[in-house]
Image: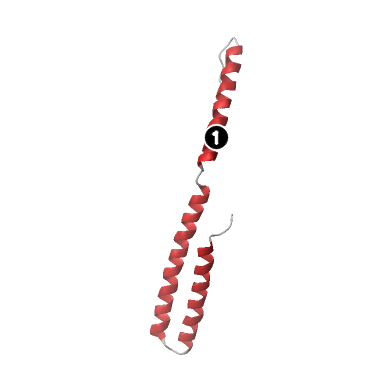
Amino acid sequence: MTRPPDLKDIDEQIEKLNVEKEAAVMEQDFEKAAHLRDRAEKLKKEKDKLTKDWRDKARRPTASSMKKHRRGRLQDDAACRSRRSARTRPSAC
């Protein structure tokens, strides 16, 4: 499962903001550093949301996988019914 390209871009932006923030701290421009920190935190939250959405989408069953599951289930049920009808005593399949 490959990460979406957006996440890589966001990681690069966060890293750039952190470098700029460190430079602002070294220059003792604390207001700028705080602003850069806030922007980086906002990007981190956006990244977390994108990651969660991506993982949820990857885990969600597709229509074709659901068809396969249903088809397999129907075949299993038919086999169970035929075995059951061949027996004289009823039993659970």
| Residue farthest toward the front in the current orientation of the protein | 64
Place of residue 2 in the rendered image (x, y in percent of width and height, measured from the top left): 58, 57
Which amino acid lies under the numbered mark 1 shown in the image of this protein? His
Please give the name of the residue rendered at 53% of the width and 32% of the height, measured from the top-left corner.
70
Quadrant of res 86: top right
Q: Name the residue carrying label 1.
A: 69
Tell me if residue 93 can be seen: no
Place of residue 79 in the rendered image (x, y in percent of width and height, measured from the top left): 60, 21
| Residue farthest toward the bottom in the current orientation of the protein | 27
Please give the name of the residue rendered at 53% of the width and 63% of the height, measured from the top-left corner.
5
Tell me if residue 85 can be seen: yes
- Is residue 89 or residue 43 the one in the foreground? 43
Q: Secondary structure at mark 1?
A: helix
On-image quarter of the C terminus? top right
Place of residue 71 in the rendered image (x, y in percent of width and height, measured from the top left): 55, 30
Say above or below: 41 vs 2: below
| Residue farthest toward the top in the current orientation of the protein | 88
On-image quarter of the N terminus? bottom right
Please give the name of the residue rendered at 55% of the width and 29% of the height, measured from the top-left corner.
73
Q: Is residue 38 left or right of residue 65?
A: left
Place of residue 11 in the rendered image (x, y in percent of width and height, measured from the top left): 52, 69
Say above or below: 91 vs 14: above
